[in-house]
Image (cartoon, helix red, strand yellow):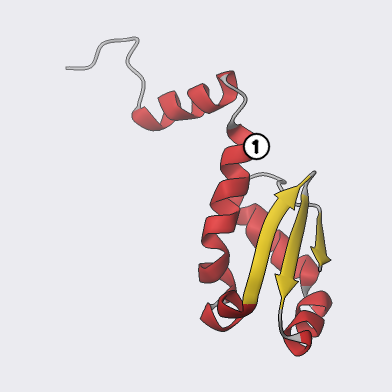
Amino acid sequence: MRKPNDVTLKDAISKMLDVYRLRRKFDETSILAIWPEIMGTAIANRTKQIYIHDKKLFIRIESSVIKNELVMVREGIIRKLNAHAGSQVITEMVFL
C-alpha cells in the first residue's frame, strides 16, 4: 500500500539531480554514451575523441570524408542528440 508522500524512483532521482545540480553533467554523459548507437558503428569506430564543453560537442574523426558528411548533417545530429537527452544540451558541433 502506498503512502501519500511516496514518490517513484524516477522522480526521486530526477529531484536529486536537480538539487545537487548534476542534471547538465548527467545529460552530457548520456549523450556521449549513446553516440555509437545514434551514429552507427562505422562512425563510432572512426571517432577518436568526443567531449562536451559549454554546450558545444567537440568531435575528432580520423576520416576526412566522414567529417565532411557530418558537417553537412550537423543540425540533424544535434536535434537527435538533444531529443535523446530531453533538453537542449548541445547547441553547436565542432570538428577537430
Decide if residue 91 is on the left or right side of residue 43.
right
Which quadrant of the rendered structure holds the C terminus? Answer: bottom right
Q: Which residue carries the number 1 mark?
A: 24
Identity of the residue drawn at 49% across and 29% down = 14
Identify the residue at horizontal 72%, vertical 46% (top origin): 88
Please provide percent x and percent y for residue 24. Answer: 65, 37
What is the secondary structure assignment of the residue under circle 1? helix
- The amino acid on which the numbered mark 1 sits, given as a three-letter code, is Arg
> Residue 45 falls in which quadrant of the image?
bottom right
Q: Position of residue 69 (x, y in %)?
A: 77, 84
Nearest the camera: 23 or 64? Answer: 64
Using residue 96 as the reference point, say whether residue 52 is left or right of it. left
**In front: 76, or 54?**
54
Residue lying at the far left of the rendered structure: 1
Q: How many marks?
A: 1
Q: Is residue 51 above or below residue 11?
A: below
Location of residue 23 with respect to 58 vertically, above or below: above
Q: Quadrant of the N terminus?
A: top left
- Disc 1 crowd rating (10 Å Cα; few below 14, some 14-19, many 20+) is some
Pick out the residue farthest to the bottom. Answer: 65
On the image, the x and y values in percent for residue 49 come to 66, 65
- In the rendered structure, the answer to whether residue 32 lies left or right of residue 76 reads left
Whole-percent x, y for residue 60 in the image: 73, 70
Quarter of the rendering containing residue 79: bottom right
Extreme top residue here? 4
